[in-house]
Image (spheres, coloured by chain):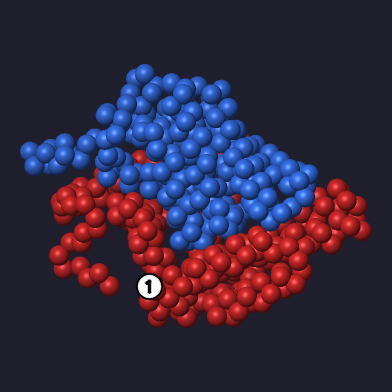
Chain colours: A blue, B red
Amino acid sequence: MRRMPLKESLFLGFCAVFILVFRAIFRLHLHIPGHAMFFTVFFLFIARASVNRLPAATFTGMLAGLGALVLGIGKAGPILFAKFMLPGLVIDLCALLIPGLFQSTIFCLVVAALAGSTKFLDTWVMDWLIGMDRKVMLQHALFESGTAMLFGLVAGLFVVPVFRKLRSHGIIPGKSGIPDSSQSVQPENQSTSKEKQG
Amino acid sequence: MFLIDSKNQQKDYQIRKASKVSLSRYGRSTVWVWFVVALVLSFFAFGAKTPVALTWLSGGDIVLFAVHRPGHRFIRRMFKVVCWQVGLIVTLYCLRFGVAEGLLSGLTTSWQLCLAFLPGAIFIETVPEHLITRMLTDVMPSRSAFVLATCLNFIPMVLAEAKSIYEGQVLRGARILPKDLANPGNWAEMLNCLVVPMMIHSMKLAQEIALAAKARDFGKKRGRTAWPGESDS
Protein backbone atom coordinates (compact mmCIF):
# COMPACT_ATOMS: atom_id res chain seq x y z
CA MET A 1 0.00 0.00 0.00
CA ARG A 2 1.31 3.44 -1.00
CA ARG A 3 2.30 5.68 1.87
CA MET A 4 -0.11 8.50 2.61
CA PRO A 5 1.27 11.89 1.46
CA LEU A 6 2.07 14.34 4.24
CA LYS A 7 -0.55 16.79 3.00
CA GLU A 8 -3.30 14.19 3.37
CA SER A 9 -2.03 13.19 6.82
CA LEU A 10 -2.03 16.83 7.92
CA PHE A 11 -5.54 17.38 6.59
CA LEU A 12 -6.71 14.34 8.58
CA GLY A 13 -4.90 15.82 11.57
CA PHE A 14 -6.88 19.03 11.17
CA CYS A 15 -10.13 17.04 10.94
CA ALA A 16 -9.15 15.44 14.27
CA VAL A 17 -8.47 18.91 15.69
CA PHE A 18 -11.92 20.06 14.52
CA ILE A 19 -13.53 17.12 16.32
CA LEU A 20 -11.83 18.15 19.56
CA VAL A 21 -12.33 21.91 19.14
CA PHE A 22 -16.05 21.63 18.39
CA ARG A 23 -16.55 19.13 21.21
CA ALA A 24 -14.81 21.51 23.61
CA ILE A 25 -16.76 24.57 22.42
CA PHE A 26 -20.19 22.95 22.48
CA ARG A 27 -19.62 21.21 25.83
CA LEU A 28 -20.02 24.67 27.36
CA HIS A 29 -23.39 25.34 25.77
CA LEU A 30 -25.23 22.06 25.22
CA HIS A 31 -25.78 19.70 28.13
CA ILE A 32 -27.35 16.85 26.20
CA PRO A 33 -25.75 13.40 26.61
CA GLY A 34 -24.25 11.99 23.39
CA HIS A 35 -24.16 15.27 21.46
CA ALA A 36 -20.39 14.99 20.98
CA MET A 37 -21.02 12.10 18.57
CA PHE A 38 -22.44 14.65 16.10
CA PHE A 39 -19.02 16.25 15.55
CA THR A 40 -17.11 12.96 15.75
CA VAL A 41 -19.22 11.27 13.07
CA PHE A 42 -19.46 14.36 10.86
CA PHE A 43 -15.72 15.08 10.72
CA LEU A 44 -14.82 11.40 10.36
CA PHE A 45 -17.14 11.25 7.34
CA ILE A 46 -15.57 14.38 5.83
CA ALA A 47 -12.07 13.04 6.50
CA ARG A 48 -12.89 9.76 4.72
CA ALA A 49 -14.60 11.58 1.84
CA SER A 50 -11.69 13.98 1.32
CA VAL A 51 -8.92 11.40 1.53
CA ASN A 52 -10.14 8.28 -0.23
CA ARG A 53 -7.88 5.79 1.53
CA LEU A 54 -8.77 2.85 3.71
CA PRO A 55 -7.47 3.96 7.08
CA ALA A 56 -8.35 7.69 6.68
CA ALA A 57 -11.24 7.79 9.17
CA THR A 58 -9.54 5.37 11.56
CA PHE A 59 -6.34 7.42 11.42
CA THR A 60 -8.34 10.59 12.10
CA GLY A 61 -10.01 8.83 15.03
CA MET A 62 -6.64 7.74 16.35
CA LEU A 63 -5.29 11.30 16.12
CA ALA A 64 -8.44 12.64 17.80
CA GLY A 65 -7.97 10.09 20.60
CA LEU A 66 -4.36 11.13 21.07
CA GLY A 67 -5.32 14.79 20.89
CA ALA A 68 -8.03 14.21 23.51
CA LEU A 69 -5.38 12.61 25.70
CA VAL A 70 -3.08 15.60 25.29
CA LEU A 71 -5.78 18.27 25.71
CA GLY A 72 -7.73 16.50 28.44
CA ILE A 73 -11.01 16.08 26.55
CA GLY A 74 -13.21 13.03 27.17
CA LYS A 75 -13.79 10.86 30.17
CA ALA A 76 -13.47 7.28 28.95
CA GLY A 77 -10.37 6.37 30.97
CA PRO A 78 -8.10 3.74 29.42
CA ILE A 79 -10.46 3.14 26.45
CA LEU A 80 -10.37 6.75 25.22
CA PHE A 81 -8.88 5.72 21.86
CA ALA A 82 -11.67 3.22 21.18
CA LYS A 83 -14.19 6.00 21.63
CA PHE A 84 -12.78 7.83 18.60
CA MET A 85 -11.30 4.99 16.58
CA LEU A 86 -14.29 2.64 16.44
CA PRO A 87 -16.62 5.06 14.59
CA GLY A 88 -13.73 5.73 12.19
CA LEU A 89 -13.26 2.03 11.60
CA VAL A 90 -16.98 1.58 10.87
CA ILE A 91 -16.94 4.49 8.38
CA ASP A 92 -13.80 3.15 6.68
CA LEU A 93 -15.24 -0.33 6.31
CA CYS A 94 -18.60 0.94 5.04
CA ALA A 95 -16.91 3.28 2.55
CA LEU A 96 -15.02 0.26 1.28
CA LEU A 97 -18.16 -1.84 0.94
CA ILE A 98 -20.58 0.82 -0.36
CA PRO A 99 -19.38 2.64 -3.49
CA GLY A 100 -20.77 6.18 -3.73
CA LEU A 101 -21.51 6.25 -0.01
CA PHE A 102 -20.99 10.00 0.26
CA GLN A 103 -23.61 10.75 -2.39
CA SER A 104 -26.48 8.85 -0.83
CA THR A 105 -28.22 10.41 2.19
CA ILE A 106 -29.83 7.08 3.13
CA PHE A 107 -26.52 5.22 3.16
CA CYS A 108 -24.93 8.08 5.08
CA LEU A 109 -27.70 7.92 7.67
CA VAL A 110 -27.31 4.16 8.07
CA VAL A 111 -23.53 4.34 8.36
CA ALA A 112 -23.73 7.34 10.74
CA ALA A 113 -26.13 5.41 12.98
CA LEU A 114 -23.79 2.41 12.87
CA ALA A 115 -20.84 4.64 13.76
CA GLY A 116 -22.83 6.17 16.62
CA SER A 117 -23.79 2.74 17.88
CA THR A 118 -20.13 1.95 18.58
CA LYS A 119 -20.66 3.86 21.82
CA PHE A 120 -22.53 0.75 22.97
CA LEU A 121 -19.28 -1.22 22.80
CA ASP A 122 -17.25 1.45 24.67
CA THR A 123 -19.80 1.73 27.45
CA TRP A 124 -20.38 -2.03 27.63
CA VAL A 125 -16.64 -2.82 27.85
CA MET A 126 -16.10 -0.15 30.52
CA ASP A 127 -19.08 -1.40 32.56
CA TRP A 128 -18.06 -5.04 32.07
CA LEU A 129 -14.56 -4.27 33.32
CA ILE A 130 -16.13 -2.63 36.38
CA GLY A 131 -18.19 -5.77 36.94
CA MET A 132 -21.63 -4.18 36.70
CA ASP A 133 -24.80 -6.23 36.75
CA ARG A 134 -25.54 -7.64 33.29
CA LYS A 135 -28.99 -6.10 32.90
CA VAL A 136 -27.96 -2.67 34.22
CA MET A 137 -24.90 -2.83 31.98
CA LEU A 138 -27.13 -3.46 28.97
CA GLN A 139 -29.55 -0.66 29.89
CA HIS A 140 -26.70 1.79 30.52
CA ALA A 141 -24.99 0.93 27.22
CA LEU A 142 -28.31 1.10 25.34
CA PHE A 143 -29.13 4.53 26.78
CA GLU A 144 -25.68 5.93 25.99
CA SER A 145 -25.54 4.43 22.50
CA GLY A 146 -29.15 5.46 21.78
CA THR A 147 -28.41 9.15 22.27
CA ALA A 148 -25.11 8.79 20.38
CA MET A 149 -26.93 7.12 17.47
CA LEU A 150 -29.47 9.93 17.41
CA PHE A 151 -26.76 12.58 17.11
CA GLY A 152 -24.85 10.39 14.66
CA LEU A 153 -27.98 10.30 12.50
CA VAL A 154 -28.24 14.10 12.57
CA ALA A 155 -24.59 14.31 11.50
CA GLY A 156 -25.26 11.81 8.68
CA LEU A 157 -28.02 14.08 7.43
CA PHE A 158 -25.53 16.91 6.80
CA VAL A 159 -22.77 14.84 5.17
CA VAL A 160 -24.11 14.84 1.59
CA PRO A 161 -24.78 18.64 1.31
CA VAL A 162 -21.41 19.48 2.85
CA PHE A 163 -19.71 16.86 0.66
CA ARG A 164 -21.25 18.53 -2.44
CA LYS A 165 -20.21 21.96 -1.22
CA LEU A 166 -16.62 20.85 -0.61
CA ARG A 167 -16.55 19.20 -4.03
CA SER A 168 -17.75 22.43 -5.65
CA HIS A 169 -14.86 24.22 -3.91
CA GLY A 170 -12.40 21.67 -5.29
CA ILE A 171 -11.54 20.11 -1.96
CA ILE A 172 -13.11 16.84 -3.07
CA PRO A 173 -12.95 16.48 -6.87
CA GLY A 174 -14.37 13.54 -8.83
CA LYS A 175 -17.55 13.42 -10.90
CA SER A 176 -18.51 9.87 -10.01
CA GLY A 177 -19.24 10.74 -6.42
CA ILE A 178 -16.50 8.49 -5.22
CA PRO A 179 -13.65 10.87 -4.46
CA ASP A 180 -10.62 10.04 -6.49
CA SER A 181 -7.59 10.24 -4.24
CA SER A 182 -5.24 10.79 -7.15
CA GLN A 183 -7.19 13.96 -7.99
CA SER A 184 -8.46 15.01 -4.60
CA VAL A 185 -5.06 15.69 -3.11
CA GLN A 186 -2.26 16.88 -5.28
CA PRO A 187 0.96 14.92 -4.72
CA GLU A 188 3.62 16.95 -2.97
CA ASN A 189 6.25 16.46 -5.69
CA GLN A 190 3.86 17.92 -8.31
CA SER A 191 3.22 20.99 -6.24
CA THR A 192 6.92 21.54 -5.71
CA SER A 193 7.68 21.14 -9.42
CA LYS A 194 5.00 23.76 -10.12
CA GLU A 195 6.60 26.02 -7.57
CA LYS A 196 9.95 25.56 -9.27
CA GLN A 197 8.41 26.29 -12.69
CA GLY A 198 6.75 29.39 -11.29
CA MET B 1 -19.89 32.60 21.21
CA PHE B 2 -16.23 32.61 20.27
CA LEU B 3 -15.69 35.84 22.20
CA ILE B 4 -17.19 34.27 25.30
CA ASP B 5 -15.24 31.08 24.66
CA SER B 6 -11.95 32.86 24.16
CA LYS B 7 -12.39 34.56 27.54
CA ASN B 8 -13.27 31.25 29.15
CA GLN B 9 -10.39 29.53 27.40
CA GLN B 10 -7.99 32.25 28.50
CA LYS B 11 -9.16 31.88 32.09
CA ASP B 12 -9.04 28.10 31.80
CA TYR B 13 -5.57 28.29 30.28
CA GLN B 14 -4.30 30.50 33.14
CA ILE B 15 -5.72 28.11 35.74
CA ARG B 16 -4.36 25.09 33.89
CA LYS B 17 -1.00 26.80 33.50
CA ALA B 18 -0.86 27.52 37.23
CA SER B 19 -1.78 23.95 38.09
CA LYS B 20 0.73 22.56 35.60
CA VAL B 21 3.66 24.54 36.99
CA SER B 22 4.25 21.92 39.65
CA LEU B 23 5.05 19.32 37.00
CA SER B 24 6.67 21.46 34.33
CA ARG B 25 10.02 21.43 36.12
CA TYR B 26 10.20 17.62 35.91
CA GLY B 27 11.65 15.74 33.02
CA ARG B 28 10.37 13.17 30.59
CA SER B 29 11.00 10.18 32.86
CA THR B 30 8.94 11.73 35.69
CA VAL B 31 6.02 12.15 33.32
CA TRP B 32 6.29 8.48 32.33
CA VAL B 33 6.31 7.50 36.03
CA TRP B 34 3.14 9.51 36.71
CA PHE B 35 1.52 8.08 33.60
CA VAL B 36 2.21 4.53 34.78
CA VAL B 37 0.92 5.40 38.29
CA ALA B 38 -2.33 6.78 36.81
CA LEU B 39 -2.70 3.75 34.54
CA VAL B 40 -2.10 1.28 37.40
CA LEU B 41 -4.63 3.08 39.63
CA SER B 42 -7.18 2.98 36.79
CA PHE B 43 -6.67 -0.72 36.15
CA PHE B 44 -6.82 -1.58 39.85
CA ALA B 45 -10.20 0.17 40.00
CA PHE B 46 -11.56 -2.39 37.53
CA GLY B 47 -10.51 -5.24 39.81
CA ALA B 48 -11.53 -3.66 43.14
CA LYS B 49 -14.90 -5.10 44.13
CA THR B 50 -14.98 -4.56 47.89
CA PRO B 51 -15.46 -1.24 49.73
CA VAL B 52 -12.12 -1.83 51.52
CA ALA B 53 -10.21 -2.10 48.24
CA LEU B 54 -12.07 0.92 46.88
CA THR B 55 -11.17 2.94 49.99
CA TRP B 56 -7.49 2.10 49.50
CA LEU B 57 -7.69 3.13 45.86
CA SER B 58 -9.46 6.36 46.80
CA GLY B 59 -6.53 7.04 49.13
CA GLY B 60 -4.19 6.57 46.16
CA ASP B 61 -6.26 8.98 44.08
CA ILE B 62 -6.25 11.55 46.89
CA VAL B 63 -2.42 11.34 47.02
CA LEU B 64 -2.31 11.78 43.23
CA PHE B 65 -4.67 14.72 43.57
CA ALA B 66 -2.57 16.32 46.34
CA VAL B 67 0.64 15.95 44.31
CA HIS B 68 -0.74 17.30 41.04
CA ARG B 69 -3.13 19.90 42.52
CA PRO B 70 -5.57 20.42 39.62
CA GLY B 71 -7.50 23.71 39.57
CA HIS B 72 -11.01 24.51 40.78
CA ARG B 73 -12.32 24.43 37.24
CA PHE B 74 -11.27 20.80 36.89
CA ILE B 75 -12.94 19.92 40.22
CA ARG B 76 -16.16 21.60 39.10
CA ARG B 77 -16.12 19.78 35.76
CA MET B 78 -15.38 16.41 37.34
CA PHE B 79 -18.11 16.99 39.91
CA LYS B 80 -20.67 17.42 37.12
CA VAL B 81 -19.44 14.26 35.34
CA VAL B 82 -19.44 12.23 38.56
CA CYS B 83 -22.95 13.45 39.50
CA TRP B 84 -24.30 12.50 36.09
CA GLN B 85 -22.71 9.01 36.15
CA VAL B 86 -23.74 8.31 39.76
CA GLY B 87 -27.30 9.50 39.10
CA LEU B 88 -27.71 7.36 36.01
CA ILE B 89 -26.16 4.18 37.43
CA VAL B 90 -27.94 4.39 40.79
CA THR B 91 -31.28 4.96 39.02
CA LEU B 92 -30.71 1.92 36.81
CA TYR B 93 -29.70 -0.23 39.80
CA CYS B 94 -32.74 0.96 41.80
CA LEU B 95 -35.02 0.08 38.89
CA ARG B 96 -33.44 -3.36 38.64
CA PHE B 97 -33.07 -4.37 42.29
CA GLY B 98 -35.32 -1.97 44.19
CA VAL B 99 -34.25 1.01 46.29
CA ALA B 100 -33.00 -0.96 49.32
CA GLU B 101 -30.58 -3.21 47.47
CA GLY B 102 -29.96 -1.10 44.38
CA LEU B 103 -28.85 2.03 46.17
CA LEU B 104 -25.82 0.46 47.84
CA SER B 105 -24.66 -1.63 44.89
CA GLY B 106 -25.30 1.29 42.53
CA LEU B 107 -23.21 3.62 44.64
CA THR B 108 -20.38 1.05 44.90
CA THR B 109 -20.34 0.56 41.10
CA SER B 110 -20.40 4.32 40.50
CA TRP B 111 -17.53 4.75 42.96
CA GLN B 112 -15.57 2.10 41.06
CA LEU B 113 -16.33 3.73 37.70
CA CYS B 114 -15.22 7.15 38.94
CA LEU B 115 -11.99 5.69 40.32
CA ALA B 116 -11.36 4.13 36.88
CA PHE B 117 -11.32 7.43 35.00
CA LEU B 118 -10.22 9.94 37.65
CA PRO B 119 -6.45 9.13 37.69
CA GLY B 120 -6.24 9.54 33.90
CA ALA B 121 -8.22 12.79 34.04
CA ILE B 122 -5.95 14.20 36.80
CA PHE B 123 -2.85 13.21 34.83
CA ILE B 124 -4.08 14.78 31.59
CA GLU B 125 -5.25 17.94 33.35
CA THR B 126 -2.02 18.62 35.20
CA VAL B 127 0.83 17.50 32.93
CA PRO B 128 1.82 20.15 30.33
CA GLU B 129 0.74 19.40 26.77
CA HIS B 130 4.26 19.49 25.33
CA LEU B 131 5.43 16.84 27.81
CA ILE B 132 2.53 14.53 26.88
CA THR B 133 3.23 15.10 23.18
CA ARG B 134 6.90 14.31 23.77
CA MET B 135 5.92 11.20 25.69
CA LEU B 136 3.72 10.10 22.78
CA THR B 137 6.56 10.58 20.31
CA ASP B 138 8.46 7.89 22.24
CA VAL B 139 5.85 5.30 21.33
CA MET B 140 4.43 6.59 18.03
CA PRO B 141 5.85 6.45 14.47
CA SER B 142 7.77 9.67 13.80
CA ARG B 143 5.47 10.73 10.96
CA SER B 144 2.27 10.38 13.01
CA ALA B 145 3.97 12.15 15.90
CA PHE B 146 4.90 15.02 13.57
CA VAL B 147 1.31 15.26 12.27
CA LEU B 148 -0.13 15.25 15.79
CA ALA B 149 2.34 17.78 17.15
CA THR B 150 1.92 20.08 14.13
CA CYS B 151 -1.89 20.00 14.27
CA LEU B 152 -1.91 20.66 18.01
CA ASN B 153 0.50 23.55 17.57
CA PHE B 154 -1.79 25.08 14.95
CA ILE B 155 -4.90 25.01 17.18
CA PRO B 156 -4.56 28.70 18.23
CA MET B 157 -4.24 29.72 14.58
CA VAL B 158 -7.22 27.57 13.54
CA LEU B 159 -9.26 29.02 16.43
CA ALA B 160 -8.34 32.58 15.45
CA GLU B 161 -9.38 31.87 11.86
CA ALA B 162 -12.62 30.28 13.06
CA LYS B 163 -13.31 33.33 15.21
CA SER B 164 -12.83 35.75 12.32
CA ILE B 165 -15.03 33.61 10.02
CA TYR B 166 -17.67 33.36 12.77
CA GLU B 167 -17.75 37.10 13.39
CA GLY B 168 -17.91 37.81 9.65
CA GLN B 169 -20.80 35.41 9.16
CA VAL B 170 -22.69 36.79 12.17
CA LEU B 171 -22.34 40.30 10.71
CA ARG B 172 -23.74 38.94 7.45
CA GLY B 173 -26.79 37.73 9.36
CA ALA B 174 -26.03 34.03 9.72
CA ARG B 175 -28.13 32.36 12.42
CA ILE B 176 -25.20 30.88 14.31
CA LEU B 177 -25.36 32.77 17.61
CA PRO B 178 -25.52 30.54 20.73
CA LYS B 179 -29.27 31.16 21.11
CA ASP B 180 -29.81 30.22 17.44
CA LEU B 181 -27.80 27.02 17.80
CA ALA B 182 -30.11 25.83 20.57
CA ASN B 183 -32.43 25.05 17.67
CA PRO B 184 -31.01 22.05 15.72
CA GLY B 185 -32.65 23.45 12.58
CA ASN B 186 -29.87 26.05 12.44
CA TRP B 187 -27.04 23.51 12.63
CA ALA B 188 -27.01 23.20 8.82
CA GLU B 189 -26.31 26.94 8.62
CA MET B 190 -23.49 26.54 11.13
CA LEU B 191 -21.95 23.80 8.98
CA ASN B 192 -22.30 25.81 5.77
CA CYS B 193 -21.17 29.16 7.16
CA LEU B 194 -18.47 28.05 9.55
CA VAL B 195 -17.36 24.46 8.98
CA VAL B 196 -17.02 24.53 5.19
CA PRO B 197 -14.78 27.67 5.13
CA MET B 198 -12.73 26.19 7.96
CA MET B 199 -12.25 22.93 6.03
CA ILE B 200 -11.13 24.88 2.96
CA HIS B 201 -8.74 26.91 5.08
CA SER B 202 -7.33 23.81 6.77
CA MET B 203 -6.77 22.12 3.40
CA LYS B 204 -4.74 25.15 2.25
CA LEU B 205 -2.86 25.19 5.54
CA ALA B 206 -2.07 21.46 5.24
CA GLN B 207 -0.73 22.08 1.73
CA GLU B 208 1.52 24.92 2.94
CA ILE B 209 2.86 22.96 5.91
CA ALA B 210 3.55 19.91 3.74
CA LEU B 211 5.43 22.10 1.25
CA ALA B 212 7.46 23.76 4.02
CA ALA B 213 8.31 20.36 5.51
CA LYS B 214 9.33 19.02 2.12
CA ALA B 215 11.56 22.04 1.57
CA ARG B 216 13.31 21.03 4.81
CA ASP B 217 13.82 17.45 3.57
CA PHE B 218 11.16 16.01 5.84
CA GLY B 219 10.59 12.32 5.21
CA LYS B 220 13.83 11.74 3.29
CA LYS B 221 15.16 9.54 6.06
CA ARG B 222 13.34 6.99 8.14
CA GLY B 223 12.90 7.93 11.77
CA ARG B 224 12.78 11.30 13.49
CA THR B 225 14.81 14.14 11.96
CA ALA B 226 15.31 17.77 12.97
CA TRP B 227 16.14 20.83 10.90
CA PRO B 228 19.71 22.01 11.69
CA GLY B 229 19.76 24.66 14.36
CA GLU B 230 16.64 23.51 16.18
CA SER B 231 17.40 22.15 19.62
CA ASP B 232 15.86 18.88 20.76
CA SER B 233 15.26 20.04 24.31
Residue at point 47%, 75% (across, down): B20
Three-letter code for the amino acid on which mark 1 is drawn = Arg
Q: Position of residue B154 (x, y in %)?
A: 35, 56
* Nearest to the observer: residue A14 or residue A135: A135
Residue at point 72%, 57% (across, down): B85
User: Quadrant of residue B231 in the image?
Assistant: bottom left
Q: Is residue B104 left or right of residue A60?
A: right
Question: How many numbered markers are drawn?
Answer: 1
Q: Position of residue B73 (x, y in %)?
A: 60, 70
Q: Position of residue B118 (x, y in %)?
A: 61, 66
Secondary structure under the numbered disc 1 in the rendered image: helix
**Chain to which the residue tagged by mark 1 belongs:** B
Q: Is residue A5 left or right of residue B168?
A: left
Q: Is residue B219 above or below residue A8?
A: below
Q: Which residue is mark 1?
A: B28
Q: Is residue B22 above or below residue B133?
A: below
